[in-house]
Image (spheres, rainbow, N blue to C red):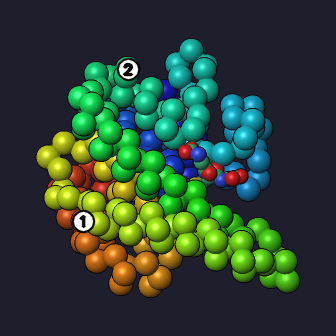
Amino acid sequence: MRLLSMPASPYSAKARMAAVLCDIGVEKVAVDTGAEPEELTSANPLGKIPVLILDDGTALYDSRVICEYLDRTFGNPIVPQGDAEWREAKRLEATADGVLDAAILVLYEGRFRPEEKHHAPWTDRQWRKALRGLAILEAEIGEVPARPTIGHLSVAALTSWLDLRFAGKWEAAHPRLRQWNADFFAAFPALDAVKPRL
Ligand SMILES: N[C@@H](CCC(=O)N[C@@H](CS)C(=O)NCC(=O)O)C(=O)O
């Protein structure tokens, strides 16, 4: 299987970490989404990463679909099957992914739109979503788990990416999450190797 991705991409990191926990090797193919290469747009019309190309040529996107595919194909190592555990994992996943969705719009406003077109009410609104989600994660994140779920992978990808893109803007208000990230990757070096990095 081939994974179209980029090292810094948090959604790609979720898929890379899921593959590690599913104990399945994937060939990582770096793709510059900004250039909209044919290799990407022919696999994913949305032009986003990650995309997992299966051995039969099927292209799967987005990160949640890829993680679910890997989980169901390789014996449910990351999505708990019990009701209570499933709810907890999926709630964490949705919250962390939603924070990412909001924060990435803030990043893209600065990256893709000329400064005179920046619209602060819009980015402020997105940042408020991110902060509300982070507050929930800060309150609810527990100990580093012995067996990470998809929820933990999402939180780990999010917090590492915030370190890359919003350094100095998120950690002080979320000390438990910052410490959890450090403890999580210290506990799982194989996941540390595939976390978001520049
Ligand atoms: N919901 C998607 C989001 C994927 C996404 O936005 N990826 C970013 C890179 S981190 C991307 O491809 N951006 C390029 C674009 O939006 O055109 C997922 O979970 O995979």
Query: Dot 2: what SS?
Result: helix
Q: As rendered, which of 45 and 98 lies closer to the eye?
A: 98
Q: Taking 17 as reference, is 158 above or below it?
A: below
Q: Which numbered mark, 1 or 2, is in the foreground of this view?
A: 1
Name the spot of residue 62 as percent of width and height, x first.
57, 38
In the picture, measured across the screen, residue 71 lies left or right of residue 48, that is left
Name the spot of residue 65 as percent of width and height, x first.
51, 32
Which quadrant of the structure image shows residue 69? top left
Q: Residue furthest top?
A: 56
Q: As rendered, which of 144 and 142 lies closer to the eye?
A: 142
Q: Is mark 2 within 8 Å of ligand 1?
A: no
Name the spot of residue 41 as percent of width and height, x first.
75, 37
Amino acid at pointer 1: Trp
Q: Taking 11 as reference, is 172 above or below it?
A: below
Chain-order first, disc 1 or disc 2: 2
Amino acid at pointer 2: Thr
Q: Residue at x 45, y 48 (%)?
A: 94
According to the image, label 2 marks what residue? 73
User: Would you call the spot at circle 1 few (<14 residues within 10 Å), some (14-19), or many (20 or more)?
Assistant: some
Cα–Cα span, label 1 and label 2: 29 Å
Q: Tag on residue 79?
A: none
Q: Tag on residue 180?
A: 1
Q: Residue at x 27, y 60 (%)?
A: 140
Asked if residue 33 shows in the view, the reply is yes
Name the spot of residue 49 as percent of width and height, x first.
60, 45
User: Quick check: marks 1 and 2 in contact, CB under 8 Å?
Assistant: no
Q: Taking 22 as reference, is 175 above or below it?
A: below
User: Would you call the spot at circle 2 few (<14 residues within 10 Å), some (14-19), or many (20 or more)?
Assistant: few
Q: Residue at x 54, y 66 (%)?
A: 129
Q: Residue at x 20, y 64 (%)?
A: 183
